[in-house]
Image: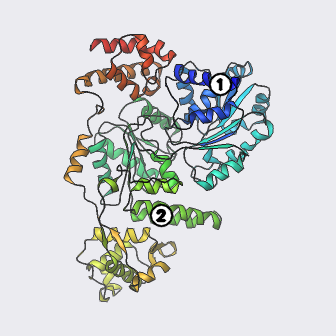
Amino acid sequence: MGTARTAQMQRAQHVLDQVFGYSEFRLNQQKVIECLLAGLDALVLMPTGGGKSLCYQIPALVLDGVCVVISPLIALMQDQVSALRQLGVKAAFLNSSQSLDEQDAVKRALSAGELDLLYLSPERLMTGAMLHMLERCKLALFAIDEAHCVSQWGHDFRKEYKQLSVLHQRFPGTPRLAVTATADERTREEIANELSLQNAQRFISSFDRPNIRYAISDEGNGREQLWQFVHNTHADNSGIIYCISRKKVDETAQWLCKKGRVALPYHAGMDSGMRQQNQSRFLREDGVIIVATIAFGMGIDKPDVRFVAHLNLPKSIESYYQETGRAGRDGEPASAWMHYAMSDVVMQRKWLEQSDGADTHKQVQHQKLDALLDLCEATLCRRQILLGYFGETLRDPCGNCDNCLHAPETWDATHEAQMVLSAIYRTGQRFGAVYVTDVLTGKQDQRITTNHHDQLQVFGMGEKHTAMQWRSILRQLMARNLIIADPDQHNGLRLTASARPILRGEQQILLRKLKRPSPKALKAAKTAKNRVPVDIQPEDAALWDALRAKRSALAREQGLPPYVIFHDATLRQLARDKPSRLEDLDAITGIGEKKRDRYGKAFLEVIAAFA
């Protein structure tokens, strides 16, 4: 590395320490920054919470000129700009939430070379006036955030992203960085091709988020299971709950409120002002739960989301990973919990068949859904399966997912599978799961009698199993694509070609038994309700609460989320180390010069009161 490049990296290290308050780089941050400082393009995959933003924010402060950040959401721009301004960084955004006077002020600052970072949506960037203005500016680099939005195979496709190859054409001398947290091999290639980044250096960090505990269940009532999860393990924590429909969002939020939690809905059918208000409360208040459709979450920079729950099946592993990745961005323990039912599988497959996509696209989406179902029905370590999907190998089981903690039992269900398949076939392959279950359990029902299905050999043959157990068997057979719901027959179940070897007795099938957590596991879950972090001594609990209260008060005064003042990790270190002088704060992670000078005295006074 030449003398000039060495000096730049020394400057980058200084910015990391003095501006952002961190002593060392994480993951591939240093290599990415070296690449950009050398004037080269980069494609970066880094897990949510891995520090992607620093990969372009630090070069923006080292290089001459402005870093233009292309971001898909207004909320993301505003949050990042607010956080950067707290650090003394000259950052701004241009979007429709601003008045014309505010937009003109930002444009004047841009033209005068007074900005380090400018956040734009792809739509705003692509206007002729904006491109012309940038051509007259000194540019440091372009950063394309959430780059997976360019992929038609992905889960957050935005057609405007496909136009961003214009940056390569009109600004050939300006380095470009594309960053994302979720992209399989196919999506990576599409990002490179669509954005003309074929020659970009690629930096792929581990997809693993070891602090997140994964758990997936198909047992019992989803809503009651959700309450047990939230109440037992996250009684005071902020979290996100995803539902498949707007109606279910509203109903779930109301139900949680009746249970005593602060739960707010978020979906596209709401008034935009109320949506914004609910998001703002989620960001600024502790212990708030957002219940949302998948419209919520991209770019949400709240680090202390302690859980993400799904009350319905997501669309793919990419969607699941992206959404669960919003938990535990601060690196502290967090939970990803999901409950799904056979109706979710039916609905997802129905939507795929009825979509307007080309056959090739439908085929890919079916493969993605099948991969997700494999994850749901797995009896082995879920993290190994999840990482394997993204091409990463985890040698040993993680020890931090439900299958590792409470290994599911399997059983030889070949005979039961044959009964199910026979019942579906003999009733005409036109009835749903409830009807088939009633036939198997021998339920006296008028419809069954009218259809003479009580005369079938399979009628009552499965009475030794409960209806709940048969539904579990049906879900697992559907997940393995042995049976499907036919949309042309009101979602009646029918057999696939894969069912034949089972029916003929040529193939054995092992299924997962219903899981019952041990008393030890239930006791451990209940102890997790403690609101004081495990690394805080009991005698420091009052100091921890006082530090959080001071942070909240300072945040309210400025209309900011508390984490923009300090992250929880910073408060924990303050509670443990109990610094007494301003200069002692330089050793605290997350406190740079500006924050030390702005907030140091206030927090030292809190600590002194407990000395």
- Counting from the top left corner in percent of width and height, residue 255 is at 32, 46
Q: Quadrant of residue 391?
A: bottom right
Q: Which mark is residue 187?
A: none
Q: Residue at x 45, y 46 (%)?
A: 324
Left or right placement of residue 220 versus residue 105 in this view: left
Q: Residue at x 44, y 15 (%)?
A: 599
- Counting from the top left corner in percent of width and height, residue 305 is at 41, 38
Circle nearer the N terminus (1, 2): 1
Contact, CB < 8 Å: mark 1 with mark 2? no
Left or right placement of residue 471 versus residue 481 in this view: left
- Counting from the top left corner in percent of width and height, residue 572 is at 35, 26
Q: Which mark is residue 6?
A: 1
In this rendering, the label closer to the viewer, 1 or 2 = 1
Q: Which residue is mark 2?
A: 347
Report the quarter where the N terminus lies.
top right
Name the residue type under label 1.
Thr
**Which of these two is toward me, 363 or 490?**
363
Q: Residue at x 68, y 45 (%)?
A: 160
Left or right placement of residue 559 versus residue 456 in this view: right
